[in-house]
Every structure is written in structure tokens, then in C-alpha cells.
Image: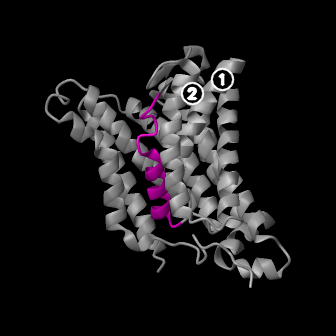
Amino acid sequence: MRRPGVRVAATLSGFTALAITLTILQQSGLRPAGLIETALLAMTPLAFAAVGETINEKSGQINVGIEGMFLLSAIAGVYMSEMVNSGVAGLFFGGLVGALIGGLLGVLFTLGKADQVVAGLALNILAAGLFQYLLMAIWAFPGIHIFPRELVIPRIVIPLGEISLAVSPITLAACASTAIAVYLLYRTMLGLRIRAVGEKPELLDVAGLSVARTRIVAGVLAGFLVGLGGAFMPLGWFGGLVKEISAGRGFIALAAVVFSGLNPVTALAATFLFGFAEGLAYIVVVTPGVKEVVPFHFVQMIPYILTVAVLALFPTLRRFPKALGKPYVRE
């Protein structure tokens, strides 16, 4: 059952809590601008992945392998950036790797009739092992790789009255991808086909259009966005590769998609709230007087606790296409 009013109310409540938290930090003498900057960085890969997965699920496919795609696109992006000495080129290459994986999954789901959940979990397991192998095979160092600082995509400073924010242009691109996704899904013929193949694939087939081709195209588009998010983490945020770089963010992006009811705009808002939770955890950890009182490991759990809480409190917001996860068999 759809309850868009509850979804909007929950989103507004989250942003109200965010405003209250910022006010408290300001009154405590802390720097809320730093928290917002961290939140935007943490939001970016989640936003790309959530918007991409919204398109994917609208077509009737569910990809639980976002975590693995993050890992593989991250290492591919760093490798290419070092090859051509350009962080932007590495970011784009990570997107292409994500598109390739998304297309392969689409082929498995449509032509191979593979179980979508099992295939996604297999991708996560494969990527976890392959990531560590490639770190050793390419850079001969286990677990971590730090690349030259000049490859990190620079941020731009946006003045906002008395404060200024250092924001990555890729974060702005992630927000723009939401508007593009809305336009694609609801204002283009391709978007109509994607939505139709998720609800009634037999109607698309009767109209003489290919169900498999439409779903594969949706998978490629979604994979490209996920790949951008994966490559952004080392090239626009962390400045290096570690084996825990994804840290469950693929599943948090899935949680944002579930909460949003497959609405790209609401998914973007949800990813910012999750990003804010991660930024708050970081601020608490490095703030003297606070980090000594609040347990470190509990603070690191904040984004994941928020994810579980959102899904537990708003289970009825889930709105999936009727053919989601079901391979189409022509009668």
C-alpha cells in the first residue's frame, strides 16, 4: 500500500532533526560547516547508487551486488587515473566498469534467467576477494594503496553568507543525476518502457519491443551511476584504497531505495540523511571532550543504526514493481 504522506513526513522529520543537530553543534562552539561538507561527501556515492538502483528496480531488476560494484569500480578508477594521470578520467572509467557489470548482470537476469538475489550476493563475494587480489597484483601491497594527492578531484568553495562550504563538483553531479533520472523515467519513451517492463513485461512484448533489451539498458544505466559512486570514494573523498572502502554503503544505498518507494528525489534526501549520520559520527570521533565520553565503536555504528531504524519504522513504504525479481518467460 502506498503512503506517500508518511514518506514525506518522515523525510521532513529527518531534516528537522538535522537542523536541530546543527543548531546544537553551533551553540557548542563546533563547526557545523565541516559536518555538512562531510555529509555531502558521504552522500555522494550513496546518491549515485540509489538513483541508479531506482532505475534498475523500475525495470523489474533488483541488484544486491552494489557493494561489489563499488569495490571493483573503485579499484578500476584508481588504476586508470594513475595510467593517464587524471582523476576525472579515472572516475569516468569507474563508471564504465560499473556499466559493464550492470550490463552483464542484465544479461544474466534476462537471458540466463538467473536468480537476481543470488547473483548479486555472488558478485559481492567475488568482488571482495578480487579487490584484495588486484591490490597485490597491481601495486604489490596488501590491504591499502595511497595514490598521488594531485589525482584527487578538487573541491569548489561555495560561499553561503558568513560561512563557506568546500563541495566536490561530483556531489553536484550526483544531485543533478536525480533530476535526470526523474526526467528519464517520466518524460521519455525509454522511461515509459522501463516502467512498463517492470510492471507488465508482457505488454511490452505484445507491442513488439524487447523485454530483455530494455532491462539490459536499464542495468547499464544503473551500473554506470553505481560505478561513478564507487570510483568517487577513492578519487573524490578518501584519497586512497583500502579493502574496507565500501563499508556496507552498497546496502545503505539499497535501504534508501526501499525507503523512497523508488522515488529518485526521496532517495536523494534519504542518502543525505544517511550521509549526515556518517558525518556526525566522524565529528564526534575527532572532537576533544566528546570522543573520550562516547565509545568509538558505538559512534561508528550510527549510520547503520539509522538504516535499520528507518527500515523498521517505515516498512509499509516499500513500493516495488509487480515483476521485480521475476525473469520474463514468453508464453
- Answer with left or right where residue 290 lies relative to residue 6: left
Q: Residues within 10 Å of mark 2 (few under 14, many from 20)?
A: many
Q: Is residue 297 above or below residue 148?
A: below
* 256 in the magenta segment: yes
Q: Which residues are magenta?
A: 242-261
Sequence-wise, the earlier of marks 2 and 1 is 1
The residue mark sitting in front, 2 or 1, is 1
Seen as rendered, the residue at the extreme bottom is 331
Image location of residue 221, percent across then percent down? 70, 52
The residue carrying mark 1 is 81
Of 25 and 199, the residue lying toward us = 199
Q: Evaluate if marks 2 and 1 touch, with contact meaning CB atoms under 8 Å apart.
A: yes
Q: Which disc is residue 235 wearing?
A: 2
* 249 in the magenta segment: yes
Q: Helix or strand or loop: what does disc 2 sit on?
A: helix
Q: Residues within 10 Å of mark 1 (few under 14, many from 20)?
A: many
Image location of residue 104, percent across then percent down? 68, 53
Image location of residue 64, percent across then percent down? 51, 56
Of 148 and 182, the residue lying toward us = 148
Q: Is residue 37 above or below residue 83?
A: below
Q: Is residue 23 above or below residue 193?
A: above
Disc 2 marks which amino acid? Leu
